[in-house]
Amino acid sequence: MRKKHTRKLPKPKRPKAKLGLPDLDHSRSAVLDGLRSPESKRGYRHAIDEFVRWYCSEPRLSFNTTVVTRYRIHLENRQLAAGTINGRLAAVRRLAYEAADAGLLSPELAAGIRRVKGIKKLGVRLGNWLLSEEARRLWQAPELSTLKGKRDGAILSVLLGCGRRRRELADLQFAHLQQREEHWAIVDLVGKGGHIRTVPMPDCVKSKVDAWTAEAGLYSGKLFRCVCRAGKVVG
């Protein structure tokens, strides 16, 4: 009787505990591809690249809870702000999850990395914050007799009166300005993280915007355009 030769199936690859540069580059690309905002991509790219340089400085490190905790201590020793440290850790957590989704890291290690706590924000938030009178003076600073001044006044009005970010302001279109219940609003504007928002626009802000668009002769497309030295709208 001849023995039947059974074909051995290849063993499934086990997730790694130590990731090399190709694995980290693959996970980094997956993280960045999942982000919409250019600002978020820039921030995550910087945070991940910084972590990879630190991680690869000791090639035998495993990618686990202990290592990420050590990285947090490393960031604390650099005396970075709590918000900065928490942002860097958020990028590392996302890197771990993308590695786990690709089968490069075990789900248990990724879950452990997620449990690494950030830094508590204590006390009053520091920084220079405008008082209402200071904001009013800033609002009135542009020279409204020129086209550029009207544009700058409208930009400051939207930033201060509607609380918009720079990217949201740059992406603002005429189609976003709509009347809702007899009031003007910025409708369906895609903001940070891909969130869609509708924001009320005060009448004083709308009047500044109308003064700019009427002087510039704009009726569609992007709301704010470049003004050249000759005082003409470009783009």
Image: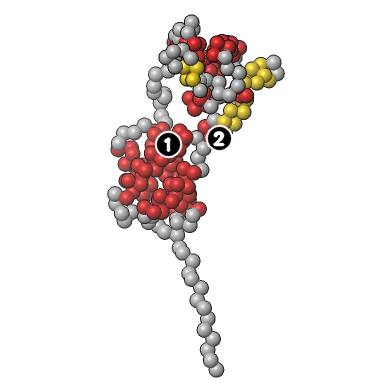
Mark 1 crowd level (few <14, some 14–19, many ≥20, 10 Å Cα)? few
Mark 2 crowd level (few <14, some 14–19, many ≥20, 10 Å Cα)? few
Residue 16 percent across, percent down from the top left:
42, 59
Asked whether 196 or 130 is in front, the reply is 196
Q: Is disc 1 placed on a helix, strand or loop?
A: helix
The residue depicted at 61 percent of the width and 18 percent of the height is: 219
Q: Which residue is mark 1?
A: 42
Q: Amino acid at mark 1?
A: Arg
Tell me, yes or no, if residue 68 can be seen here: yes
Answer with left or right where residue 173 lies relative to residue 230. Answer: right
The residue depicted at 39 percent of the width and 21 percent of the height is: 127
Answer with left or right where residue 195 lies relative to residue 106. Answer: right
Q: How is the image coloured?
A: secondary structure
Q: CA distance from mark 2 to mark 1?
A: 15 Å
Residue 156, label in figure: none
The residue depicted at 47 percent of the width and 47 percent of the height is: 30
N-terminal label among 2 and 1: 1
Answer with left or right where residue 63 lies relative to residue 217. Answer: left
Q: Is residue 98 above or below residue 126?
A: below
The residue depicted at 51 percent of the width and 37 percent of the height is: 36
Q: Amino acid at mark 2?
A: Gly
Q: Is disc 2 placed on a helix, strand or loop?
A: helix
Q: If the image is split into quadrants, where does the N terminus sit? A: bottom right
Residue 34 percent across, percent down from the top left:
51, 43
Answer with left or right where residue 172 lies relative to residue 78. Answer: right
Asked whether 74 or 95 is in front, the reply is 95
- Check the image and name the residue furthest to the right: 181
Residue 117 percent across, percent down from the top left:
43, 42
Tell me, yes or no, if residue 159 can be seen here: no
Q: Is residue 58 above or below residue 218?
A: below
Q: Which residue is mark 2?
A: 194
Residue 150 percent across, percent down from the top left:
50, 11
